[in-house]
């Protein structure tokens, strides 16, 4: 995902670190259950961003396409 400002890059890095810690704590769950739960959570987060006017439907589609490309890449 593209980052526009240094503050956004710092915030993204902090979020990634926190998510890595959370993923470690959730590692005992089956991968399919974890993926489903994360998908539900992502849907809620994107709905909030959309409702606040912080992104539009096309931007959400673009993010999801980027996620799909990354998840389905030959060399992850």
Image: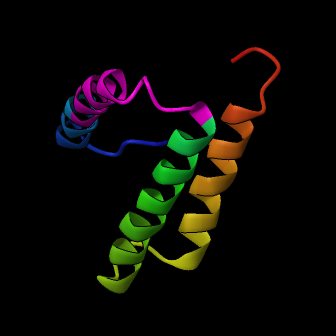
Residue under the point 22% across and 31% down: 18
Q: How is the image coloured?
A: rainbow
Magenta-drawn stretch contains 1: no
Q: Is residue 14 left or right of residue 42?
A: left
Q: Is most of the magenta stretch helix, strand or loop?
A: helix
Residue lying furthest right: 74
Query: Which range is magenta?
Result: 15-31
Q: x and y percent of residue 74 in the render?
A: 82, 19
Residue 29 place in picture, x, y as percent: 47, 32
Q: Determine whether 29 is above or below 5 in the image.
A: above
Q: As drawn, is 58 to the left or to the right of 2?
A: right
Which of the 4 image quadrants contains residue 6? top left
Choose between 27 and 68: the one closer to the eye. Answer: 27
Q: Residue furthest top?
A: 75
Query: What's the residue at 33%, 20% (across, down)?
Result: 24
Question: Who's the residue at 64% across and 45% down the image?
Answer: 66
**Where does the C terminus fall, quadrant-wise?**
top right
Q: Is residue 38 above or below residue 14?
A: below
Residue 54 appears in the rendering: no
User: What residue lies at 25% left-to-right and 36% top-to-bottom?
Assistant: 15
Does 17 lie within the magenta span? Answer: yes
Asked which quadrant contains residue 62, the reply is bottom right
Residue 26, percent from left and from top: 36, 30
- Location of residue 27 with respect to 46 vertically, above or below: above
**Number of numbered discs overlaid on the protein picture:** 0
Classify 53 as above or below 11: below
Is any part of residue 25 visible from this angle? yes
């Amino acid at each position: 995902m593209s980052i526009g400002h240094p503050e956004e890059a710092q915030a993204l890095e902090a979020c990634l670190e926190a998510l890595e810690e959370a993923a470690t704590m959730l590692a005992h769950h089956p991968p399919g259950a974890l993926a489903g739960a994360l998908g539900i959570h992502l849907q809620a987060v994107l709905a909030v961003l959309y409702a606040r006017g912080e992104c539009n439907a096309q931007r959400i589609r673009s993010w999801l396409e980027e996620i799909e490309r990354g998840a389905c890449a030959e060399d992850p």
